[in-house]
Image (spheres, rainbow, N blue to C red):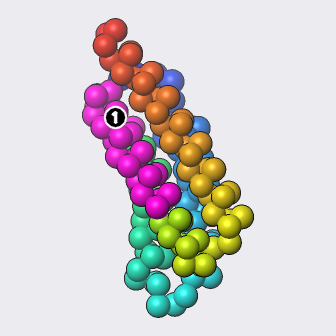
Amino acid sequence: MVNKIRFKSFEEIPVWRSSHKLTIEVYKITKKFPAHEQYGLTSQLRRSSSSIAANIAEGFGKYTTKEFIKFLYNSRGSCVETVYYILLARDLEYVTDQEYLELRKKCDEIGKQLNGWMKSLKVKLVNH
């Protein structure tokens, strides 16, 4: 499998590391959300952000590059979902504009990394 040649574990993958850091930041920021959002926006934002890294990890454990790419697509979808939730948190004034911009920038960077990796893996898949 292509991804296992370059990385021995999912923890070595740069985009996984970035998404894991994002999740930690989301958990810290959502601690200050209103208590009534515990099962609402807090939960949704935590789930979507953690799903980015979780899909990369799960995909890494699959047997084929094609399966792995599918999980990277899921990861990208979770990244876009996270962007929406941080936008909503900003509009509800649960996060500041600055916190929103910082989180948004990290999500955008993760999305670019995922897109680049999927493109690279697809090329390798076609050529093998």
- The secondary element bearing badge 1 is classed as helix
Instruction: Indicate the position of residue 4 as horizontal and vertical percent values.
Output: 43, 27
Please say whether residue 11 is visible from this viewpoint.
no
In the rendered view, would you say 65 is above or below 28? above
In this view of the protein, which residue sits in the foreground, 93 or 124?
Answer: 93
In the picture of the structure, the residue carrying the numbered disc 1 is 68
Residue found 59% across the figure and 78% down from its top = 94
Please say whether residue 39 is visible from this viewpoint.
yes
In magenta segment, residue 69: yes
Total marks drawn?
A: 1
Residue found 42% across the figure and 45% down from its top = 76
In this view of the protein, which residue sits in the foreground, 5 or 71?
Answer: 71
Q: Is residue 15 left or right of residue 119?
A: right
Residue found 68% across the figure and 72% down from its top = 96
Amino acid type of the residue tagged 1 in the rendering: Phe
In the rendered view, would you say 69 is above or below 30? above
In magenta segment, residue 51: no
Q: Quadrant of residue 65?
A: top left
Q: Is residue 98 left or right of residue 76?
A: right
Instruction: Indicate the position of residue 25 as horizontal and vertical percent values.
Output: 63, 63
For label 1, count other residues whose C-alpha is less than 10 Å away and answer few (under 14), some (14-19) or many (20+): many
| Residue closest to the far front | 91
Region in magenta: 59-84
Instruction: Indicate the position of residue 20 as horizontal and vertical percent values.
Output: 56, 53
Quadrant holding the N terminus = top left
Quadrant holding the C terminus = top left
Q: Is residue 69 left or right of residue 33?
A: left
Q: Main secondary structure of the magenta part?
A: helix
Residue found 60% across the figure and 78% down from its top = 93
Instruction: Indicate the position of residue 46 as horizontal and vertical percent values.
Output: 48, 68
